[in-house]
Image: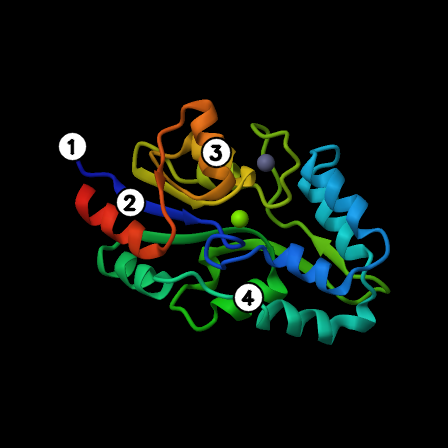
Amino acid sequence: MMTAKRKIVFCDFDGTITVNDNIVAIIKHFKPEGWEELVQKTISTEISIKEGVGSLFRLLPTSMKKEVVEFGISNAQIRDGFAEFVAFCKEQQIEFYVTSGGIDFFVYPILARYDIPEDHIYCNKSDFTKERIEILWPYPCDEHCDNDCGMCKPTVMRQFDPEQYERIIIGDSVTDFEGAKLADQVFSRSHLTEKCRELGIAHTEFSTFYDIIDAMKKKG
Ligand SMILES: [Mg+2]
Ligand SMILES: [Zn+2]
């Protein structure tokens, strides 16, 4: 007997749930000496995301914890329709996971007002106990991924058997691309759309979460 696959959503955070990238916003706001070179090297993939993000936060002293955390939380703007999309998933019994390359000190507080269990939120962690901010990486790449992602989206997705789950990814950037290759359905914006086009991966463009709700309702 065929049983229908269970839908599961893996949703990016920065630039997807939020309108802008929060890591870039924090670094640009505090402008620690040497940030521009590190951002450039990360974008050009001369260094990995993990190395880039780790090095960028290491430029900030932990004495600035309060300002950094407050800015990280207050600066973020949520994309339209997100609360409705979380409710839609719950109503349709679609499992909802956040797969974020962001950092705990802004990801959890920003998502606190939505009904998302904490163990459904994957992100990087931070340590403010030393002189400089240290990023911790609890969800590293498995043996199938050598991108040094930091928080490895394909690794998280592989924990959900494609025989049992219809895997849906929502994202905006190249860091979502490896996940998009594994997914049954891709909702994309910005750089992820360009990358999917370039490499012929089926995708549905969105600009708000209402677009995603509509598309999922139509598809059934
Ligand atoms: Mg993103
Ligand atoms: Zn990886």
Expressed as whole percent of the image width and height from the top left, the position of residue 155 reads: 52, 38
The amino acid sitting under disc 2 is Lys
Say which of 104 and 207 sits in front: 207
User: Tag 3: Cα neighbours inside 10 Å, few (<14), some, or many (≥20)?
Assistant: some
Identify the colour scheme used: rainbow
Looking at marks 4 and 3 on the same chain, the residue that comes earlier in the sequence is marked by 4
Q: Between disc 4 and disc 2, whose residue precedes?
A: 2
Residue that mark 1 sits on? 2
Q: Is residue 94 visible in the rendered structure shown here? A: no
Pinpoint residue 12: horizontal percent, then vertical percent. Answer: 48, 50
Residue located farthest toward the left when viewing the structure as drawn: 1
Give the residue type at disc 3: Glu
Callout 3: helix, strand or loop?
helix
* Residue occupied by mark 3: 194
Q: Nearer the viewer, mark 2 or mark 1?
A: 2
Quadrant holding the N terminus: top left
Quadrant in the picture for residue 202: top left
Residue at the spot 19% in from the left edge and 39% down from the top edge: 4
Residue type indicated by callout 1 = Met
In the displayed structure, does residue 84 sit left or right of residue 66? left
Separation of residues labelled 2 and 1 (CA atoms): 15 Å
Between marks 4 and 2 in the image, the one whose residue lies nearer the viewer: 4
Q: Would you call the spot at circle 2 few (<14 residues within 10 Å), some (14-19), or many (20 or more)?
A: some
- Foreground mark, 1 or 3, reads 3
Residue at the location (36% across, 47% down)? 206
Q: Nearer the viewer, mark 3 or mark 2?
A: 3
Label 4 SS: loop
Q: Which residue is mark 4?
A: 76
Q: Residue furthest top?
A: 199
Element under label 2? strand
